[in-house]
Amino acid sequence: MSANTAELNYAGKTYRFPIVTGSEGEKGIDISTLRRDTGLVTYDSSFQNTASCRSSITYIDGEQGILRYYGYPIEEIAGRYTFVETAYLLLHGEFPTKEQRAQFSRKLNEYSLLHEDMVHFFDGFPRGAHPMHILSTMINALATFYPNVDLLSLKEDIDTSATRLISIVRTLAAFAYKKSIGEPMVYPRHDLSYCANFLNMMFNSPVKPYKIDADIVDALNLLLVLHADHEQNCSTTAVRVIGSAQVNLYATISAGISALSGPLHGGANQEVMNMLRQIQSRSETVDSVLARAKDKKDPFLLMGFGHRIYKSYDPRARIIREMCAKILDKLHVRDPLLDIARELEEKALKDEYFVDRNLYPNVDFYSGIIYHAIGIPEDMFTVMFTLGRLPGWIAQWREMVQDKNRKIARPRQIYTGPALRHCPEPHR
């Protein structure tokens, strides 16, 4: 048997399938002809062993703790490049030149205003509505105000549509927050950077002007950069699947937001804060909490530790941990929840049980702490994730629609219902 093929022996016949190799040496079996040749399909619950596409955007090696955007290590990007520059990288494959960055920034500023007719949409949501649900709905509604976002027009105008969406999503997010607390909306300013503008729209008030802090702006830039893309996760897969039906960009991104809103995906950092609050309310010690986490009979889960993909330290967590310490020290935060988090982190990193099982604090553990410290409310945590992930979703969607071999996503199934049976006489 050739090293470039894999064999399947079935029903007395041998079938050969080619091996495909990625640029980092990872290998997969191309089974695109499996059903045609054998009548079989593969069964892979939750696609844990299935590569659904070829992609040149993000590379992850979970065993080695590697994350790269277009080949660039996340350790070299974070803290060195802004979120705007990273978004440009994801959309174009390279970091912008000085001129390209200036032009991109001008477009982000130009497209930051929301159509005034859409502002009235916020009045239709009940007070207290979750900002993620508002954001998903409003993104979907954008297609009616900017209708030229179908597949054909995007062949020529994809940069405009992508830039508008990246810019306007922060305005929508900030407006959604202001609506949820009953405060007047704050419009974007032309003289502020992307992250500073968002913070100002979130926290500025007629009765309490917001003072922009450069360190907090840097922290937000870092958080968004670290979340900008993460390969074929649940929400990115949703974007690719929905987009494969040639759904417009805004509706496609709305689907990604809906997928991200789940507690097992984008809501993980909010679950961390809920866990810390429960620990505080029960007056538990950190030692007792760690003991519960080790007890297989105890249903308690230590949120924010370990990762589905990373079997070593999450490279994003290493970076964000330093920023977390910097922000907490700078703000002189005195918060019992953050005290619990710091003690939990310190003791877990020294505990053989967690170290041996690679259950290190992940990016969700630290991001929730930072957001909490700088005043972002917990129901906005997933919205912040959306702001960061948006360029990655658009890049993944763009790559998919430009693939000449694309087809509408259509998984198969293994049917487990009743065999053929005939309808009984109706009861009359």
Image (tube, rainbow, N blue to C red):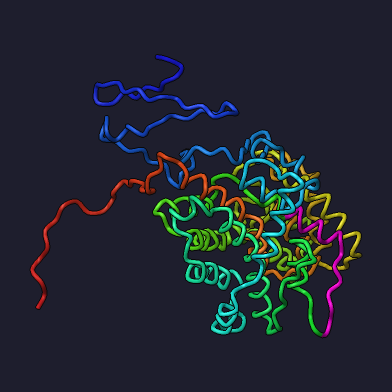
Q: Is residue 353 visible?
A: no
Question: In front here: 160 or 322?
Answer: 160
Is residue 50 positioned above or below 394 on the image? above
Looking at the figure, which quarter contains the N terminus? top left
Is residue 80 positioned above or below 6 on the image? below
Where in the figure is residue 336, as x and y percent of width and height? 83, 67
Task: Tell me which corner region of the image, top left, top right, bottom left or bottom right, holds residue 343.
Answer: bottom right
- Determine if the magenta segment contains residue 410: no
Q: Residue at x 61, y 58 (%)?
A: 266
Looking at the figure, which quarter contains the C terminus? bottom left
Q: Residue at x 62, y 48 (%)?
A: 229
Is residue 360 positioned above or below 302 on the image? above
Question: In front here: 427 or 102?
Answer: 102
Residue 213 lies left or right of residue 372; in this view the side is: right
Residue 372 lies left or right of residue 212; in this view the side is: left
Task: Please count the marks in the image.
Answer: 0
Where in the figure is residue 292, as x and y percent of width and height? 69, 55
- Determine if the magenta segment contains residue 217: yes
Residue 13 lies left or right of residue 222; in this view the side is: left
Q: Residue at x 79, y 65 (%)?
A: 192
Where in the figure is residue 182, as x and y percent of width and height? 68, 84
Range of magenta residues: 207-223
Q: Is residue 245 visible?
A: yes
Where in the figure is residue 376, as x and y percent of width and height? 74, 68
